[in-house]
Each structure stands twice: as C-alpha cells, then as structure tokens.
Image (cartoon, rainbow, N blue to C red):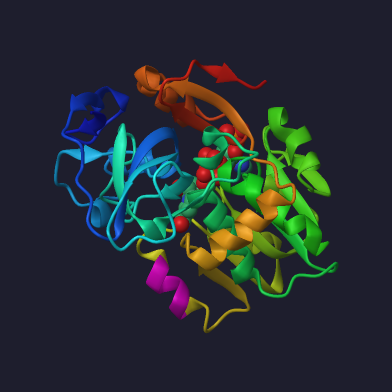
Amino acid sequence: MKAITYHQFGNTDVLQTVEESLPTIQANQVLIKVKAVSINPLDWKIRKGEMKLMSGSKFPKHTGVDFAGIIEETGASVTRFQKGDEVFGVVKNTMKEGALTEYIAVPATTIWQKPSHITYAQAASIAVVGAAAITAIQKMGNINAQSNILVNGATGGVGMFLLQLLTPRAASITAVTSTHAMDFAKKWGANIVVDYTKQHVLQQKNNYDIIIDLSGKMGYANARKIMKPQSLFLNPVPKPIEIPASLIKNVFTGKKHVVILSNPSSKNMDMLLNAINTGLQIEVNKTFPFAQYKEAYLYAEKGGYTGKVVIEFNEASTHNS
Ligand SMILES: NC(=O)c1ccc[n+]([C@@H]2O[C@H](COP(=O)([O-])OP(=O)(O)OC[C@H]3O[C@@H](n4cnc5c(N)ncnc54)[C@H](OP(=O)(O)O)[C@@H]3O)[C@@H](O)[C@H]2O)c1
C-alpha cells in the first residue's frame, strides 16, 4: 500500500510516497481503508521540526492525523464496529503516527461512526479541531449573554467549530478573520467581525471576558491589553515554557492564561456528533486527490482559506469558492 513518509525535517519537498506492507491489527484494533485525511497545522509543525520535544527526531515519520474511511477488518475484542462501517477518527499518538496512507490500523476507541449525511472529507475534518473547540468551551466555564468573547483566527478549522458551538450560548462573539472569510464568520454566529487585514485587533475598544487566540499571533502579553481584570486567555498554541509558567502566574493575576489541549474523548465526540447531526456545518474549502498531496500541503500552509483542506483517495480535486 502507498503511504507518505519523510526522513528529515523540512518543507513539503521532504515528503515522499513509499510502498509499505498492509498493517496487521491487534485484538483491540480495526483496519481502515482510508478515504480522506484532513490537514492540520500540527502536520507541518511536526514536519518542520517545531515540535521535536514531543515528536522526537526518529525517522521515517508518517504524517496526517485526522481521517475517515471504511472498516476492512476488526480485531477479536472489537464489538462496537464491523466490516463495512463508515467511520472517522484520529490516530492514537498524534506526535508519532500518520494517517496519510491507504490503510491504517487504529484502536477502536479512536474512531466513531460517520454521520451518513456528511462526506468522507467532512468527516475527516472533525476529530482534532472539533475536540479542540469543545475543550475550549469547557475551559470557558459559565458563558451567558453578558460574556464578551473574542475569537482571533475565527474561520479556520477550530474556529469553524467554536463559533457554531458558542452561538447557542448567546454570548457576544467578536470574530477576527481576513476579508475573504467575513461572511462565514457571520453565518457561523459572530455578532461582530473584525478584518485583521484592515484593523489591528488590539485597537478594539471592547474589553473581553474571554480571548482565544487560534492564529497563534496575538499572545498572552498582547491579549492582556484588551482583557477585563477578571478574564481568561485561552491558548491552543503554547510555547513549551508557557505551560508551567502560566500555572504559576495565574496565582497572582485575575487575567488567567490557560492552555488548551485537544481531547477527542468519547464524551466530547458524542457532543460534537450531536451538534453535527443537528445542523453544525463543516466547511471543506478544497480537496486534493492523493497524488497531489504536496500541492495540498502547500495550499494549506499558505493559508487564506476557510474551514479545512482535505486529501482524498480516488477522488478528483474540488474547490469551494
Ligand atoms: N492544542 C491543541 O490541542 C490544538 C488542537 C487543534 C489545533 N491547535 C492549534 O490551534 C491553531 C488553530 O488551528 P486551526 O486548525 O484552526 O488552524 P487554521 O485552520 O490554520 O486557522 C488559523 C486561522 O488564523 C487566521 N489568521 C492568520 N493570521 C492571523 C492574524 N494575524 N490575526 C487573526 N487571524 C489570523 C487564519 O486566517 P487566514 O488564513 O485567512 O489568514 C486562519 O483562519 C493552530 O496553531 C493549531 O496547531 C491546537
């Protein structure tokens, strides 16, 4: 079977197609014929060597963590799934494993049934970013109509889920995005939309109860300037030092700095699936066939799109404008 690997850290040039033998499954695992893999910033951060502390420096490495596909075989102790089920999921160890391969063996605990009304590309776009959005909402605590929330980088993968999950909670949501995505931000529930290419977010007159920085470009030190005295900064892209440092600093300040780690637990995925089955939209901006995986990564890494970019097996390219 074909798989994508790399033998050194670097740009898309280091990615290569290799032939590997079909994985064998253990009793708790399933073998999945992969139909789609969505791209996450995590993929290229690992490939560029930006996460060596967690990914290690051992090669070859595989890439891609979010997938959807069809079950080919189930292990002896797997009871929740059977051959032929359409599923989506995430690799167990996102730092060391990769899903961009024709077949993948994963524990049955890291997959879920694909809702029948969505495509494989949409299903492959759920687990990592959806779970990050759910985790963010859990960290936010009690949100009500008085809560003033700023989502910086609001129309990428996590933002797409977060805006739609926040909307029923009636908070006031300011979305920061670029010009092309302003209509999406409004459609997904933002009350105020700020175009970061025209206005600097720190010029906002508002003071916020909660800021979440999905762009990774604002940072806690800047965010503090537009936070209320008792408030929360949620950070899904912490530098390693920020994880222990924020815990200590939080004891002495009302402007808390909290790190988010995506948790695709069954409970969180059930909440997401409930939202998806009752209307949450999953925007796939562009799909690429497997043979064009390098073009897919180049496109995704450049940015400037809304929602997700997906690589599909046996499919032609599609593009939503
Ligand atoms: N901790 C965790 O467990 C976890 C889980 C999931 C994701 N993450 C991280 O969270 C971040 C967001 O993930 P994602 O999948 O949503 O990424 P994404 O799809 O790339 O979204 C990031 C968004 O930020 C916007 N942006 C870029 N520059 C900006 C600026 N100066 N001001 C405001 N917005 C700006 C981009 O818009 P344009 O492209 O239009 O410029 C893009 O829509 C990534 O760094 C990812 O690695 C962490």
Is residue 246 shown in magenta? yes
Left of 140 or right of it: where is 290?
left
- What span is colored magenta in the figure? 243-248
The quarter in which the N terminus is drawn is top left
Whether residue 228 is situated above or below residue 85 in the rendered picture? below
Left of 233 or right of it: where is 299?
left
Is residue 201 shown in magenta? no
Q: Quadrant of residue 221?
A: bottom right
Residue in the image at 69% along x and 42% along y: 281
Majority secondary structure of magenta residues: helix
The quarter in which the C terminus is drawn is top right
Whether residue 69 is situated above or below residue 224 in the rendered picture? above
Residue in the image at 75% along x and 70% along y: 143
Q: Quadrant of residue 6?
A: top left
Residue in the image at 60% along x and 28% along y: 285
Nearer to the camera, 199 or 73: 73
Nearer to the camera, 106 or 238: 106
Nearer to the camera, 59 or 130: 130
Locate residue 217, reporting x and y percent.
Answer: 53, 46
Whether residue 111 is situated above or below residue 32 in the rendered picture? below
The residue lying furthest to the top in this view is 316
Locate residue 313, reporting x and y percent.
Answer: 40, 25
Report if residue 14 is visible in the image.
yes
